[in-house]
Amino acid sequence: MSEEIIELKGVKKLYKLGKLEVPALRGIDLKINRGEFVCIMGPSGCGKSTLLNILGCLDRPSEGRCLLNGEDVAELDDDTLSEIRCNYLGFVFQSYNLIPQLSVVENIEIPLYYQGVSPKDSRRKAILLAERVGLGDRLDHKPMELSGGQQQRVGIARALVNDPLLILADEPTGNLDSASGKEIMSVFKELHASGKTIVLVTHDENIARYAERIVKLKDGLIETDERI
């Protein structure tokens, strides 16, 4: 059995809207092992994004435990959670979240800046990752000079630059046409083959088939959890 990277135990999340309490997650039990490629699916409002935010230490559960590499991150303070995100997690966003004034290589370097890596080492690593995702000839281009698929490749390279324990992707093909989406999913497939652990949120059945395991949510609960 592979080593567990994530274990959620009875995770609930309530959002308060004035006097109203809205349950987003109603009691999630979930384990994810090292090297797995897991897709989270479900209709709008089922809790997908809330679950991903908790896995990514961007939000805390209202109740339950969230163990990341054996440590209960639900009880940690904001500064410690920030360090965990910086050192152990890689995020890929639907909207890319690139800084328009920076070049491809500079956008990839950003997480290393916050880790205090030397400029020489960060530039070398960023160039290697740009080449890995097929952008070796676009190092000095700004985001607006790239296609959507190329911008997302920059986002993936940036997510990899800290050699994360876990890659979290939120609708990474949502803003792309079908051809570009397939290219991006091929990159994720290669990353998984190299041993990376990936959790990806999507509403697209075709995208979900790239994973080896699909977790479907409904009304804040896990409806099915199947290997494919």
Image (tube, rainbow, N blue to C red):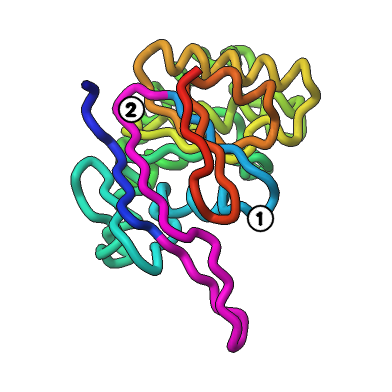
Front in this rendered view, residue 67 or 63 = 63
- Residue at numbered disc 2: 121
**Picture coordinates of residue 61, whole percent (x, y):** 39, 63
First reached walking from the N terminus: tag 2 or tag 1: 1
The residue at the point 63 percent across, 35 percent down is 202
What segment is highlighted magenta in the picture? 12-36
Q: Is residue 74 left or right of residue 142?
A: left
Q: In the picture, which quadrant includes the N terminus?
A: top left
The residue at the point 60 percent across, 19 percent down is 209
Q: Is residue 109 left or right of residue 41?
A: left
Amino acid type of disc 2?
Answer: Asp
Q: Main secondary structure of the magenta part?
A: strand
Q: Is residue 74 magenta?
A: no
The residue at the point 33 percent across, 38 percent down is 31
Residue 106 visible to the viewer: no
Q: Is residue 20 magenta?
A: yes
Q: Is residue 98 left or right of residue 196?
A: right
Residue 1 visible to the viewer: yes
Q: Residue 45 — which label?
A: 1
Amino acid type of disc 1?
Answer: Gly
The residue at the point 70 percent across, 24 percent down is 149
**Picture coordinates of residue 153, whole percent (x, y):** 60, 24
The answer to which quarter of the image holds residue 171 is top right
Front in this rendered view, residue 133 or 123 = 133
Nearer to us of marks 2 and 1 is 1
**Picture coordinates of residue 185, whole percent (x, y):** 61, 19
